[in-house]
Image (cartoon, rainbow, N blue to C red):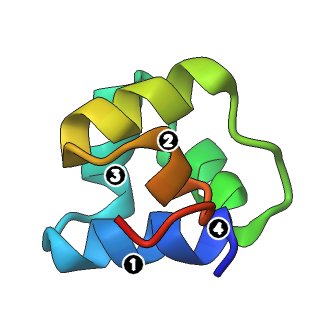
Amino acid sequence: MNYIKRMRDLREDHDKTQQQIAEILGTSQTMYARYERGANELPIRHLLTLCAYYRVSADYFLGISDR
């Protein structure tokens, strides 16, 4: 599983909108949508923020591990 799918799945599993996650990241909904589509690469600072928010490891988020 690639990180783009996992990013969307985590957001949906937590019943959050793209707008809500964009606010957590301090970015726009449009830019967040671009991250989820893979049109833009997710910056490391956002990766770290999302891992902390969802309480998952970077390895899990990136699809390197299943936990």
Q: Residue at x 48, y 48 (%)?
A: 29
> In this figure, which residue is indicated by the disc labeled 4?
4
Mark 4 or 2, which is nearer the eye? 2
Q: Front-most of 40 and 63?
A: 63
> In this figure, which residue is indicated by the disc labeled 2?
58
Compared with 45, 66 (above or below) is below
Residue most toward the left?
Answer: 15
Q: Earlier in the sequence, mark 1 or mark 3?
A: 1
Q: Earlier in the sequence, mark 4 or mark 1?
A: 4
Quarter of the view holding residue 37: bottom right
The residue carrying pointer 4 sits among few (fewer than 14), some (14 to 19) or many (20 or more) residues within 10 Å by Cα, namely some
Residue type marked 3 = Gln
How far apart marks 3 and 4 lie (CA) works out to 17 Å
Mark 3 or 4, which is nearer the eye? 4
Label number found at residue 9: 1
Q: Is residue 23 visible?
A: no
Q: Earlier in the sequence, mark 4 or mark 2?
A: 4
The quadrant the N terminus occupies is bottom right
Compared with 50, 25 (above or below) is above
